[in-house]
Amino acid sequence: QVQLVESGGGLVQSGGSLGLSCAASGSIVSINAMGWYRQAPGKQRERVAVEGSGGSTNYADSVKGRFTISRDNAKNTVYLQMNSLKPEDTAVYYCYGAITTWGLLPRDYWGQGTQVTVSS
């Protein structure tokens, strides 16, 4: 069993900043990638930012230059610093992990989601 527990999020004015964090716990052998997705009302879930095990990062074009992803591998934790937030960043943000556990094949795990609301 693996759990991804998110913290952070909330309400912020346009142009403001917020930080998210997500800690993975359980019978973890290795984490191949961790990152963040988001889903706005009436829209499909989209990738925001993902960091691979080698430190490579991938950002959605809409957040490049504003959001920064980082990982603390010792703590199995991923962070997302969001600056210059816009109303269109409003969504439920989900933590994602591509994780290998004891006795099982690698699979994707998801957090419960945390709401980010940016007011104009």
Image: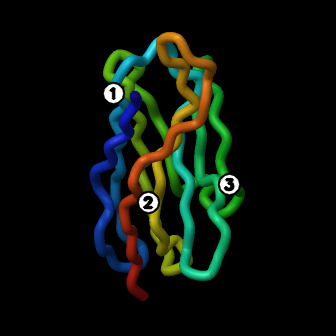
Q: Amino acid at mark 2?
A: Asn
Residue located at (33% from left, 35% from top): 23
Q: Earlier in the sequence, mark 3 or mark 2?
A: 3
Q: Nearer the viewer, mark 3 or mark 2?
A: 3
Q: Position of residue 10 (x, y in %)?
A: 29, 68
Q: Is residue 37 above or below residue 103?
A: below
Q: Amino acid at mark 3?
A: Ala
Q: Position of residue 120 (x, y in %)?
A: 42, 88
> Disc 3 designates what residue?
60
Q: Are marks 3 and 2 in contact (CB under 8 Å)?
A: no
Residue located at (65% from left, 27% from top): 56
Q: Nearer the viewer, mark 1 or mark 2?
A: 1
> Disc 2 designates what residue?
83
Q: Is residue 81 above or below residue 98?
A: below
Q: Are marks 1 and 3 in contact (CB under 8 Å)?
A: no
Q: Earlier in the sequence, mark 1 or mark 3?
A: 1
Distance in Å between CA atoms under marks 1 and 3: 27 Å
Disc 3 crowd, CA 10 A, few/some/many (<14, 14-19, 20+): few
Q: Residue furthest front?
A: 103
> Disc 1 designates what residue?
25
Q: How many marks?
A: 3
Residue located at (48% from left, 74% from top): 90
Q: Position of residue 17 (x, y in %)?
A: 36, 62
Q: Quadrant of the N terminus?
A: top left
Q: Is residue 78 left or right of residue 23?
A: right
Q: Earlier in the sequence, mark 1 or mark 2?
A: 1
Regarding mark 3 in the picture, which secondary structure is present there?
Answer: loop
